[in-house]
Amino acid sequence: MDESSYACPNCGYVHGNPPKELFHLFPGSELADRYIIGEVLGFGGFGITYKAWDKKLETIVAVKEFYPSGIVNRVPGDKNVIIYAKKRENEFYFGKDRFLEEAKNMAKFNSEPNIINVFEYFEENHTAYIVMEYLDGISLKSFLQDNGGMLDVESALQITEAIAKALSTIHSKGIIHRDVSPDNIFMCLSGEIKLIDFGAARFSQDENKMMTIILKPGFAPPEQYEKVNKQGPWTDVYALGASLYYTITGKKPEESTNRKINDTLPYPHEINPEIPVFLSNTIMKAMAVDVQFRFKNVQEFLDAIHQQVTVLPVAVEKKKRKRRRNIGLSVALFVILAGAAMTAFEWSSEKKEAELEPCEITMWYEMSSDEDLASGEQNAYQSIVDEFTSDDLYPDVKINIQGFTHDEYVEMLKTSEELPNLYELVDDDPDQTEINGEILPLDEVYESDIFKNTSLLRFAESYYGNRNYLPLGFNAPIIFENKTLIEDDSDIKSVDAISKLPESGEGFVHDDEAHEKMFGKEDGSPDQNAKKSFVGGNADFYGTMTNNYRDVNGSLPGQFSIIRYDADKIYCEYSNVWAAKKIDEDQDKAAIRLLMFMLNNSSQDKMHIRNQSENLPVNEDMIKIMVDSNPDFDGFFDNKDKYVFEK
């Protein structure tokens, strides 16, 4: 500007006037002896973006400043940032490090035409800055507001494809945007479509409870309100689908948490009949509240948009899956019934030798802290007891089942005057379970045909050093590979190769309980947050026990594989272990018979397959059915001779 000029002839700014918000940098402030700050382009909960002039390249740029509201402030006119909440100082520095980390990630994609470019990042004024390309244009949200609220299908799909390409690129590097929405999709005057605010959603991970969750209501899937390890590429698919929904209907989708309770969101073609039904179905599949019915990645979404695959309405797909599941259950049931017929023959012959007198027994077990698992356990045990006490078996035996939380259970075993006939061990360890009175030896169970036909139990006597305890499940060491981080199939096939992987970063993390079981020795330090590191995308491999399969599968559905590794021995551990207290001859006999009954096909199916417990069945027929219905475990039990149980 000419010094004699009163105001800028372009924007009308009067030199010396303060910004609209006094905590913003004043126009004319200079950063890094290179960037002259102009007007504010936007600001939110963790940063301010300015329009700026690059003196060196003589061009306009955008500068983003790390400025977490509620933690910092500044004196009007002063560039320095002040942390006024000292108790949140660590939170500020954590956020600043993440801010700079995001800049590094953004810079990786400067060759991607649909992602905003990063030129530089640096620290100054007690905070940090990212210098990006300045985009001349308008956000999709603003464009829609200025042009009737919606776009035609063809234009909307062009925008969607451009953003899908950007997402595909960042997903290939294990990074998720987590904040795709019409106000983060930018339409440049040059015709380019850019994904902006890259990295803003990284702060919504809330990994250490340090940053406020940032969401766009209507565009965030339900898992973004939950644990961070529930998020993945499918999270961005939901947001992209919701953005397309908004763009072609002019209606913002209902909040996903409300849809989870009662999903009444209309299909796009119901709002606008000109929208093709196939596209309407595709959008709703992308926006499926339940992850298992959603596209797992943007390529699947694009294939459906291009009609390379047929997409059914979500409700229809649910019915088809239920039908297939019922068919699968019917097949499994046939196998179970065949096994049950054999079991029934065994039981009918053995029953003649050991009729049970009328009696009443009690069984106690430790309930899972997970509500779903606890409900499954209760249903499984009750179903087993109902079958055992049916008219065909032992109708004169009455069985009372009681489940307790961990603390309640430990206290009850120590202090209760009336102890149960059957009880589950705490932590599957006899040393951790104290009980008054004499333990009933389980010789009859160990010498029964049903026990002898279950080869996985052949180690039980030596494992515990006696015949006082009966395991009804087991766990094996397992290694997961994050397929979103490994581009090609891993050649990690041997214990030696696994043990040489680094214990942090993009290497191998493991739980304390799993490592010795896996390698047969103590080697390396366990990661207390191994599971979180793996599902959060911070490790390629995760060594653990099979009881963590359920959590990994729930967190990374379709995004992991199980490594088949070579080893002379694979050290397993028994679980779901039961014992009996010697009380009365008739009650003792009934307790023994019930334990034996819990080894048959039907009982093992109820406990470990229908219940989806965290343990594997010791009954080999049920292991086969579990593998047949779950391809993740295909080949996992091919050589059961390697599976040994040693304390």
Image (cartoon, grey):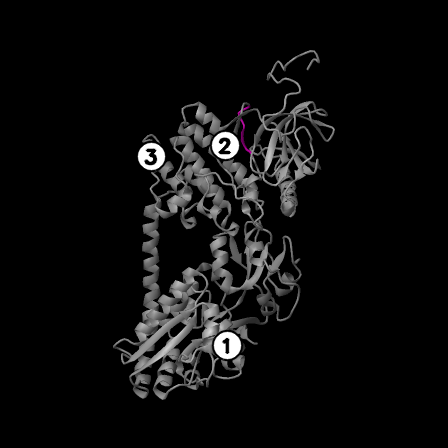
Q: Answer whether residue 288 is visible to the viewer in this image.
A: no
Q: Answer whether residue 518 is visible to the viewer in this image.
A: yes
Quarter containing the C terminus: bottom right
Residue 320 sits above or below residue 615 on the image: above
Sequence-earlier tag: 1 or 3: 3
Point out the residue furthest to the right here: 33
Residue 40: give x, y in percent of width and height: 60, 27
* Residue 637 left/right relative to 75: left
Q: Mark 2: which amino acid?
A: Asp
Point out the residue furthest to the left here: 391
Residue that numbered label 2 is attached to: 183
Sequence-earlier tag: 2 or 3: 2
User: Residue at coordinates 43% horizontally, 23% vertically from top-left?
Assistant: 147
Residue 239: give x, y in percent of width and height: 46, 40
Residue 473: give x, y in percent of width and height: 46, 71
Identify the secondary structure beneath mark 2.
Answer: helix
Residue 77: give x, y in percent of width and height: 67, 28
Give me the disc on residue 269: 3
